[in-house]
Image (cartoon, rainbow, N blue to C red):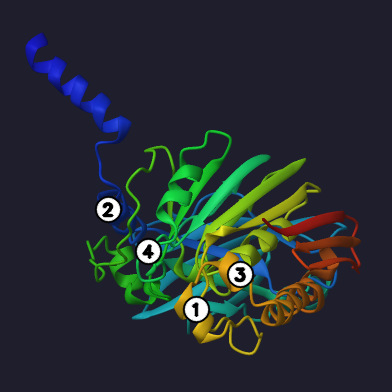
């Protein structure tokens, strides 16, 4: 018997040490994420302190999905129970607040503002008209962020790194023990819309089209988590209380990394943390595309991109670089924080890049005094 068991134990040990090729790990991550489901709710705008927090996982019954939350408004806390059921070939949601007040409607789309609550005093007190909910499928669960030093490699795919700038630098980060690394994988936007609620409730083993985003990475430690992050949109559960640093590598800086920066900040602002948040952009290990988010001027000349899409090289064009930094910094200063004014008393925003350094204090209506740094290396 020992002769039979020993090879299996050795094989299992070697497997854990990295016998699974990175491409196979990617494929398995896509397949497992396709089976995820959850209900998530947040306040869309926070002019005053308001918070929705899950108090348990999403539960699936024979004909329903359900999840419990608590809501806070700075004065008191109340309960919120979301239930989605199949009724007469339609899907109806019912949200029970404080054990007695109801918001209910048929589900028209996966992300929505909730229907009016049948008690105006409660609705005004908790500004329930600003609560949005999403019935999510094939979407990565929130990844918890604690104090410490992180490295996020965003979309290590050949379709972005077509000039092969990043393999060596990224693998160096991934194997550096001072970082907690994450690899964020690209996928099609709104992939979850390909999943039907009927299939989930009836335990149908649905199969979504295969995600195919090849990567040149090979030397990836087996303990580095892989997270499916369409266009940089995945979720975080911000638990840091003292200081957290995140170093970004990968691409594209003016689209997917920008989106992921916002996701980190949103999770921070939708928490009670007072940690110092520092985000580094390693220009030697980040690539960009010619056009960023439409209308925000996060752009680079195509002629520069064709020579090298490495951020360090693109920033050699000083005239374009100033416009780029002005736009990138200006978005956060003038637009982003306006959605969360009730969640902080002040945010000290520090933006540091070669030839462009700005420090601003954005005033809000809340209590936390926060500090966020965006620094280019």
Which callout, 2 or 1, points at the residue further toward the start of the chain?
A: 2
> What is the x, y in percent for residue 202?
27, 64
Which residue is disc 4 drawn over? Answer: 157
Which residue is disc 2 drawn over? Answer: 23
Query: What's the residue at 56%, 85% (across, down)?
Result: 301
| Between marks 3 and 4 in the image, the one whose residue lies nearer the viewer | 4
> What is the x, y in percent for residue 176?
51, 37
Which residue is disc 3 drawn over? Answer: 258
Horizontally, is 167 left or right of 257 in the view?
left
SS at mark 3 in the image: helix
Residue 131 sits above or below residue 11 on the image: below
Q: How crowded is mark 2: few (under 14 residues within 10 Å), some or many (20 or more)?
A: some
Which residue is disc 1 drawn over? Answer: 305
Which callout, 3 or 4, points at the residue further toward the start of the chain?
A: 4
Q: How crowded is mark 3: few (under 14 residues within 10 Å), some or many (20 or more)?
A: some
SS at mark 4 in the image: loop
> What is the x, y in percent for residue 248?
58, 56
């Amino acid at each position: 018997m020992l002769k039979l068991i020993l090879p299996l134990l050795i094989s299992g040990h070697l497997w854990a040490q990295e016998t699974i090729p990175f491409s196979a790990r990617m494929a398995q991550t896509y397949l497992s994420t396709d089976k995820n489901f959850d209900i998530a709710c947040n306040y869309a705008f926070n002019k005053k302190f308001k918070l929705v927090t899950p108090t348990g996982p999403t539960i699936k019954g024979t004909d329903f999905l359900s999840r419990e939350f608590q809501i806070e408004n700075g004065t008191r806390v109340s309960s919120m129970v979301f239930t989605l059921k199949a009724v007469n070939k339609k899907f109806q949601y019912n949200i029970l607040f404080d054990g007695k007040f109801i918001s209910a409607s048929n589900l028209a789309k996966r992300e929505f503002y909730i229907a009016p609550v049948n008690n105006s005093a409660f609705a005004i007190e908790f500004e329930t008209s600003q609560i949005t909910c999403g019935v999510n499928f094939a979407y990565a669960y929130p990844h918890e962020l604690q104090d410490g030093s992180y490295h996020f490699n965003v979309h290590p795919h050949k379709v972005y790194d077509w000039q092969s700038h990043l393999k060596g630098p990224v693998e160096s980060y991934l194997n550096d023990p001072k970082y907690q690394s994450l690899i964020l994988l690209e996928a099609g936007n709104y992939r979850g819309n390909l999943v039907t609620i009927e299939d989930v409730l009836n335990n149908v083993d649905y199969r979504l089209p295969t995600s195919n985003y090849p990567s040149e990475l090979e030397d990836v430690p087996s303990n580095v988590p892989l997270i499916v992050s369409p266009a940089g949109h995945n979720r975080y559960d911000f638990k840091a209380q003292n200081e957290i640093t995140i170093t970004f590598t990968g691409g594209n800086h003016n689209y997917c990394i920008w989106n992921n920066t916002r996701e980190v900040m949103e999770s921070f602002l939708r928490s009670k943390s007072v940690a110092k948040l520092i985000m580094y952009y390693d220009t030697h290990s980040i690539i960009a595309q010619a056009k960023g988010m439409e209308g925000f001027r996060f752009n680079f000349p195509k002629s520069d991109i064709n020579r090298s899409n490495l951020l360090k090289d693109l920033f050699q064009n000083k005239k374009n670089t100033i416009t780029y930094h002005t736009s990138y910094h200006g978005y956060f200063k003038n637009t982003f924080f306006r959605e969360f004014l009730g969640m902080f008393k002040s945010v000290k925003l520090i933006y540091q890049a070669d030839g462009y350094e700005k420090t601003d204090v954005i005033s809000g209506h809340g209590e936390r005094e926060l500090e966020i740094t965006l620094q280019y290396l």
